[in-house]
Amino acid sequence: MKKINLITASFIALGLTACSSEQSVSTTALTQISAPGAPGVEPFWAYSGKTGIGTSYEQYKAGHYDDSAATGKVSKVWFSIAKGMITETMFGLIHQAQIKDMQFVVVGKDFTVTENDDLDVSIDYLYKDEAGRPLSLAYKVVSKDKQGRFSLEKHIFTDPNGQTLFVRSVFNTDLEGVKAYVNVNPYIDNNGLDDFAKVTDKGLVAWQDDNFLSLQASQPFKQATVGFTGISDGLKELKMSQSLGTTYQNTGEQSGNVSLLAELGDISTNTTFDLALSFGQSEAASLKEGQASLSQGYQKLLDAYNGKGDAIGWQDYLASLEPLSTLTSSTADNGKLLYTSAMVLKAQEDKTHAGALIASLSNPWGETVSAKTGSTGYKAVWVRDFYQVAMAFMAMGDTKTAKTAFEYLEKVQVTARTPGNGGDTGWFLQKTHVDGELEWVGVQLDQTAMPIMLAWKLHQADVLSDQELTQWYGKMLKPAADFLVDGGLAKILWNDTQITPPATQQERWEEQNGYSPSTTAAVVAGLVTAADIARKAGDTKNAVRYLETAKQYNSEIESTMFTTQGNLKSDNADGEYFIRIGQDKDPNSSTTLNANNGRDGFDKKQILDGGFLELVRYGVRDALAPSIVKTLPEYDDESLIDNLQVRYTFNFADGSGSFPGYRRYGNDGYGEDEVTGNNYAEGGNNTPGQRGRVWPFFTGERGHYEIAAANASNSLNAMKQNTIKNTYVKGMEAFANEGMMLPEQVWDGVGNNKAGYVLGEGTNSATPLAWTHAEYIKLLRSLSDKHVWDHYPVVEDALK
């Protein structure tokens, strides 16, 4: 850890401050040199249910992001909004959070109110078309004091040509003697400890090693202080006395969980302050970024961010998506969520490693997740989520991002060069940082199949040429297909396991090993598409081998995963249905699944999930195949005991309608505790009582099945299309929050609700979830095209 002589530096800063004509610091407060109380309170992440995320839109240059005269400087700043507050803001790589939150504080003669207190909050977009569809990820957040003493309107976006989060705050109050403050809790370099902070004549600065952030304003701060969060940060004093009696110039030589606090000034009617939260590899660089943004001013930056005039911004990205206008007709909200989803997916791509698509710009249940050390949360690459998003980019006409994403996948495939690998190669890593750094190393065979499937789709759409397909076959796709046939030893970090396909070490929920319908659907589709690619590449021998293996796996699906002796107790259960997963090849045996997330293992025949629908989606089974049709009654059965029930019907209070939602599977423990109401893993991952909730993207998956089933029965007429739109499309739209962010999980009304969740609205799991937004876009494309978007005709034909 770098150390500097902060006492000397602070005296210099004091001298500069005293001499500066640009800085007006109150003389009523007792100014101390170094703040006491290191390291401050224990750090945790922010609330994960984001109502907004944002970053600037940047253009590729030859499939990469690059500072140049043609494309301009690449902004690598991302922000999030939750409960009306600016929360985790990233700089550098997309997972590198630099702050936990940034909030405003309003102080009157007898009150102090922070944004973290209970305010009435609404969120909207700053730039929309005539139909109310967002045209950029610039936000307007309005927070109102419940006692009517003041209101605060924030405009939030980034400088598209700099490393700055720009925030305009507009205060309104009829009271006299009211002041506004701003408070920032830095979490430099993705953790809440090890930070230093100080007051300078130009603004407030925090840093860790060579990572710096600065807070500057368009008007000089009236007062400024730094300290250790919860101990000497000034907030407690403001709340007790409505003033800062003591200010600190720095946090001394001991690092910790630091805080920045500055008085903006007196407020009355339409009092406006512009702020720049800026980042750099040095103090000078960070301050320079903020000064440049403030010098350009609000309107110029916002216009550039939006893409007005000659600037290239978000509206230009939306305009480049040719299918968008057609897809709008398949929405139930006139395209509002569609436009939002398109931008949300693009915003969740790293800008150093182009094509790196993360799962969510959030840390699930962040308020109770320690930030003592770095954590990516969902700001990381899972190839399965990645595939869903890449296919959504294709569906909305962004073939450049889809192709760049595919090319990125080479970075996360296991090869002889993968650090620490002592086993076989070809499979794709479970979870990695966007730069490819290893994080989780379980083998999920669907994640090894999906890159092959994506390549086939890209070639069919003429996004990959014949030559490119052949090159990628030799470099990445053949090793993956070989692993799907031969399996091998996974030996890296903790993992030392022999994999024998089609049995997977982990299925799509990363919790069980064995024979899974959803995993097998992807494996079969992956091998059939691999066979087709191999033929095109001239590798006839392996083309035959891949296809023969796919047919073998396909022939065993029902015999290994479809029970005829099910023991679910309900009026609709006839004992014949697909199980979620089994560790052995006998679907009628009574083997017990592994305990997970605090839930004891159950007889495998009692656990349902929607994975069997993937067999239809990819073309492995016809929509009207007996095994599929026989499973639907159990999957839809709302009379099952709650722990085993998967489907829930939601009737929204706004009268929008009645819509189906689905849990991942029966006996799911990945969610809030139904007994205590605590966050997931608040008492440890295996706390009894944890309960997985409804995931909105399953509503989309079911909508896709309904399209396939209607096609299979020649009944996809206008009436049926309208029914699908008003049930599944509208259902997904109903699950979006006020900022039109689609969540991972929504509250289903079961158990202790001490958090105050609203039925059908997102919990504190992960919002926005890229997979959910991707599923929504793909459902619109499927409905518009009148056939399932990520269906593989080559699979259907090969297995006839």
Image: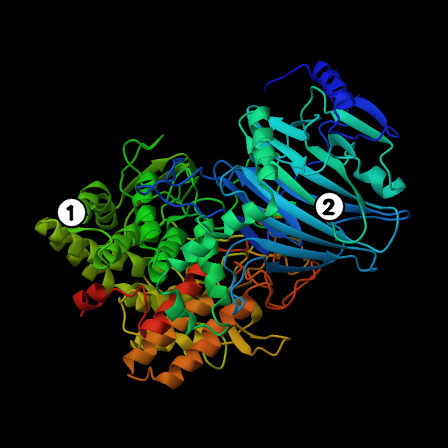
Disc 1 marks a residue whose amino acid type is: Gln
Disc 2 crowd rating (10 Å Cα; few below 14, some 14-19, many 20+) is many
Looking at the rendered structure, which numbered label has been put on residue 795? none
Q: Which residue is mark 2?
A: 104
Vertical side of 552 occupied by 227: above or below: above
Vertical side of 633 occupied by 488: above or below: above
Q: Earlier in the sequence, mark 1 or mark 2?
A: 2
Residue 779 image position (x, y, % from top left): 40, 68
Disc 2 marks a residue whose amino acid type is: Phe
Q: Which residue is mark 1?
A: 467
Identify the secondary structure beneath mark 1.
Answer: helix
Q: In this view of the protein, which residue sits in the foreground, 397 or 222?
A: 222
Residue 320 image position (x, y, % from top left): 37, 57
Residue 97 image position (x, y, % from top left): 56, 39
What quarter of the picture does the N terminus occupy? top right
Q: In this view of the protein, which residue sits in the foreground, 435 or 8?
A: 8
CA separation in Å, label 1 and label 2 = 56 Å
Identify the secondary structure beneath mark 2.
Answer: strand
Residue 227 image position (x, y, % from top left): 74, 30
Residue 685 visible in the current orientation: no
Query: Which of the two discs, 1 and 2, sits closer to the camera?
Result: 2
36 vs 769, left or right, is right
Q: In this view of the protein, which residue sits in the foreground, 525 or 463?
A: 463
301 vs 107, left or right, is left
Snapshot quadrant of residue 262: top right
The structure residue drawn at horizontal position 52% and vertical position 75%, both measured from the top left corner, is: 659
Residue 61 visible in the current orientation: yes
